[in-house]
Image: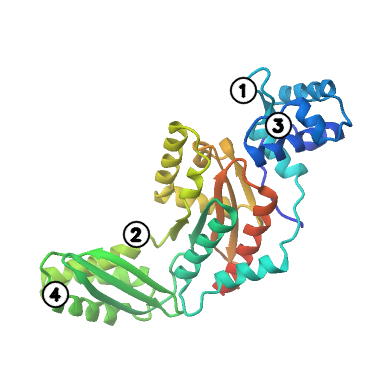
Amino acid sequence: MTQTLKNVAQGPTVEDLNHRSREILRHIVEAFVETGAPIGSRTLSRRLGMTLSPATIRNVMADLEDLGLLLARHTSAGRLPTDLGLRLFVHGILEHGNLTQEERQHIESECAVSGKGLPQILEQASTMLSALSHCAGLVVAPKVEAPLKHIEFVALGPGRALVVMVTADGVVENRVIDVPMGMPASSLVEATNYLTARLVGRTLAEAARNIRGELTAQRAELDELTGKVVEQGLAVWAGEEKSGALIVRGQAQLLEDVTALEDLERIRQLFSALETKEALLRLLDLAETAEGVQIFIGAENDLFGLAGCSLIIAPYANSAQQLVGAIGVIGPTRIDYARIIPMVDYTAKVIGRLVG
């Protein structure tokens, strides 16, 4: 399967290694993906069918270590691939094929959620990728730019209301907002009517500019409570209009590979970073710089290097071939790259068709 993979790493390339070194690096990485543990020369010799002696393998491993591709936590405890070694393997040695027809059909059926809007489809896709990859699924959703068709406020309880917004192309957004305590239901109706008269047929950016001007000039037409609801409803989307929305599912999958409290803290820091708008915009930038699947391993990307994780991400485009978002997975550096890369690639293509 041909992939466009972004490789920004500096260091030795696969051409710098002879066949023997490539094979030994490949077996060390495959053992690391399987177990997460170092592998020694005797075990490697058995995996290679005794074609090389343990002494020969030790010499090759020492050379790979000098190149920065392997590391030894203890002198006699075997070797592990470094982030650089993993990157060289993924971009130069790894072979991965097409998904089976059954796997393709499963992805298509999971993404094609009947009767649901795009946000629900993207959420389902993120959940599906998490389940299939045993990693955290991640989707950067497209920004809302289509003209609006409908907006409505629905009371949920004291101090809370649901905002339902429908765009002209059928995308449905539901958000919960805070409203003043004790606000009468009539204020929600009034806010709905006020926004409906001014939003329909306009994009959110266009409507927000006009409405904010009116709110300043026409306070007499709205009581204070209704004005606060209108402003809250606008803020829910206006604050996200440039960057879209980030959907992450399956965070608990990352915790299965945690072996120490410090690892747990790094995972927490990762998801704290993902919650910021800056991190979201950086993800979009990553996806925008290449045509196909991009892979960032460990410290290659500062956002994920902190947590010792890898990111496999692919952009998806609409029918006009405009980039509107990205989808991928975050997992430990020893994730099954051969299986997950084509999975992410195909899911991005399916989502692109559904975006239209």
* Mark found first going from the N terminus, 2 or 1: 1
What is the distance, in whole Å, between disc 4 and disc 3 at their CAs?
64 Å
Q: Which residue is mark 3?
A: 11
- Specify the amino acid type for callout 2: Gly
Q: Quadrant of the N terminus?
A: bottom right
Dot label at residue 73:
1
Q: Which residue is mark 4?
A: 222
Residue at 76% from the left image edge and 30% from the top image edge: 43
Q: Secondary structure at mark 3?
A: loop
Q: Nearer the viewer, residue 295 or 75?
A: 75
* Disc nearest the viewer among 1 and 3: 1
Q: Which residue is mark 2?
A: 239
Circles 1 and 3, Cβ within 8 Å, touching? The answer is no
For residue 18, say whether it is visible. Answer: no
| Image spot of residue 214 (x, y percent) | 21, 72
- Specify the amino acid type for callout 4: Leu
Q: Quadrant of residue 174?
A: bottom left
Q: Nearer the viewer, residue 54 or 225?
A: 54
* Mark found first going from the N terminus, 3 or 2: 3
Q: Residue furthest right?
A: 51
What is the distance, in whole Å, between disc 1 and disc 4 at their CAs?
68 Å
Q: Secondary structure at mark 2?
A: loop
Q: Secondary structure at mark 4?
A: loop
Q: Residues within 10 Å of mark 3 (few under 14, many from 20)?
A: some
- Specify the amino acid type for callout 1: Arg
Q: Residues within 10 Å of mark 4 (few under 14, many from 20)?
A: some
What is the distance, in whole Å, between disc 1 and disc 3 at their CAs?
21 Å
